[in-house]
Image (cartoon, rainbow, N blue to C red):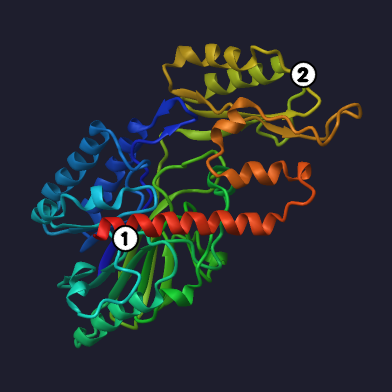
Amino acid sequence: MKILHTADLHLGQVIYQNYDRSDEHSHFFRQLEKWCIQEQPDVLLLSGDVFDIQQPSASVRKVFTDFFVGLHRLCPTMHFIITAGNHDSASRLQADKAVWLLANAHIIGVPPMAILPANDSWHDDFIIRLDSGYVVALPYMSGERHEVIQSLLDKVAQENRDGKPVVMMAHAAVSGVDLLGHDMEIGKIRTVAVEGMGKGYDYLAMGHIHKPQTIGHQEDAMEEDVTYPSPVVRYSGSALHVSCDETYPHTVSMVEIDRHGGSVRIRQLRIDELRHFYVLPQDGTSFTTADGAIEAMKALTEKQGRGYVRFRIDSNAVLPSDFNQRVYDELSKYNEEWRYNPKIIWTGSIGQNDDPEQLVFQVADLQQMTDPMEFIEKTQHNYPNLDIDDTRQAFEEIKDEVLRMREEKMSK
């Protein structure tokens, strides 16, 4: 069985409150199309976070439809299996499921019930039977559902008399995962035990974590060609660098499985990003003046073709009130080929006359915070009686309860 595994497209993302990334996604799609034609996989797996928000615009949905319909025409025998992530609307994604089947595309948005159903007919909603093997397709689920997951794998085991490969898809963070690049953008991530994902699969195609990696094999997770014994848990990584903190290479995973319980070969295909992320100064030091930062940016933009730029500045530097506007004005002549991340990396210690407990946030800092716990953790010195662990747990419980209520409503 040969699969192409990718995840976390985040179509429609507007980065740094200002920049549309549709041309970057188109650049990725051209590479994905080339790999599908060259490699001719049995199935392309997209493990969640198809869109960046739950209600993407009509133009963003058209990009999604046009690409996958076009890819089906180029590779008519290849199947597509697409699952919902935590950024997607499960019901909206699944609404056109019947139509997509005409293009060999299986879309699974709504997850199984948290409680094991009494009859077995529900299995068919999540098991895709291909000539080359089985795929158990699970969208994002709040909380652990070990019994439900194992029931699906047991059903496949009963049918799989020929020893065909078994693949499972999921969108979650499992124990042992490297979260590099996530903390600054989405706050804390709750992990689930790998054991909670059940037994009986040969390859677990994961989404949600943007760094490509193989759980339990971090030392060779970025090797271009590695073979492991079954089972293997793998994050393909996101299609684009979703934030400037994701400084590692991004890839898609070409996976070949010889048989159930056999060997799993993983080849990483390196994604060429249309715009790279640059932090200035590039030597790891910090700017002490606004003029120094802007001059370095001018030198970079004249040398490179396009990208995102961010500054590292010493905490004692005094920036003029129009600093950001000067940066935007300088980059405006590049017609958004060069883009600015206004979230400055401040280094060093503040001056002796400053009060270290007076934490000052830039407007851009607050705009980038998507998790209330990030703000609470950075200001907890103002609340000496606050139990930060209890507070964090309370927020996680609220999130899980809201998601559970939403899923129950969609199921009804």
Q: CA distance from mark 1 to mark 2?
A: 53 Å
**Residue 33 location (% of width, % of height):** 24, 46
- Mark 2 lies on a secondary structure that is loop
User: Is residue 75 left or right of 356 when viewed as pictured?
Assistant: left
Q: Residues within 10 Å of mark 1 (few under 14, many from 20)?
A: few
User: Is residue 349 left or right of 399 when viewed as pictured?
Assistant: right
Q: Residue at x 60, y 21 (%)?
A: 297
Q: Residue at x 54, y 38 (%)?
A: 244
User: Is residue 60 left or right of 76 when viewed as pictured?
Assistant: right
**Residue 95 location (% of width, % of height):** 18, 50
Q: Can you see residue 189?
A: no
Label annotation for residue 376: none
Task: Judge whether 256 appears above or below 212 on screen.
Answer: below
Q: What amino acid is found at the position of numbered circle 2 in the picture?
A: Val
To which residue does mark 1 refer?
408
- Which is nearer the eye, 271 or 82? 82
To which residue does mark 2 refer?
318
Callout in the foreground (1, 2): 1
**Residue furthest right in the image:** 352
How many discs appear?
A: 2
Q: Residues within 10 Å of mark 2 (few under 14, many from 20)?
A: few
- Which quadrant of the rendered structure holds the N terminus? bottom left
**Residue 283 location (% of width, % of height):** 69, 35
Res. 232 image quadrant: bottom left
Q: What amino acid is found at the position of numbered circle 1 in the picture?
A: Glu
